[in-house]
Amino acid sequence: QVQLVESGGGLVQTGGSLRLSCAASGRTFSSYAMGWFRQAPGKERTFVATISGSGSTTYYADSVKGRFTISRDNAKNTVNLQMNSLKPEDTAVYYCAAARVHNIVVSTTLYNYWGQGTQVTVSS
C-alpha cells in the first residue's frame, strides 16, 4: 500500500510559479512510475506529467510542455511538479498518483494509488 500526500498548492497570478510536492509512504518508491493529473470544476481528470521509476524518462501533456517540470527524489520518496508561466486555464485540483510499473504512464486507469489533491488557482 502506498499513501500519497500533496502539498504546495495555492493562489498565484498569471505568469507566476508554484512548486507542488508529493510525499509517498513505502520502501519501494523507485519501483513506481509517478504522475500528476489535474481536474478543473465540471471537467474530467486529465494527465499533466509522468516520470519513470528511475527518473530517467518524463512525458508531458502538450498544454504544459515547456512550462512544467516533473522530478523525483527516490531517497526522499518525493515527486515534484515545478509550474512556471502559469495561466488561468491551469486552475484545477492537482493530484499525485503512483503506478506499479517502472516506465512512464499516461492513462489514469493504470495508476494504482492517488493522493487527495491540492488546489491551484491562477488569477488573471
Image (cartoon, rainbow, N blue to C red):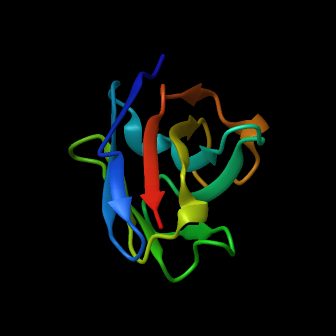
Write down the quadrant of residue 18 in the picture.
bottom left
Q: How many marks?
A: 0
Residue 103's x, y, as percent?
62, 56
Residue 32's x, y, as percent?
51, 41
Q: Is residue 104 visible?
A: no
Q: Residue at x 40, y 45 (%)?
A: 30
Q: Residue at x 53, y 57 (%)?
A: 52
Q: Is residue 36 visible?
A: yes
What is the residue that sits farthest to the top in this orientation? Answer: 1
Viewer-proximal residue, 39 or 51? 39
Q: Residue at x 39, y 38 (%)?
A: 29
Residue 89's x, y, as percent?
61, 63
Residue 56's x, y, as percent?
46, 69
Establish if 121 lies above or below 39. Answer: below
What is the residue that sits farthest to the front in this orientation? Answer: 124
Establish if 114 lies above or below 122. Answer: above
Establish if 40 lies above or below 73. Answer: above
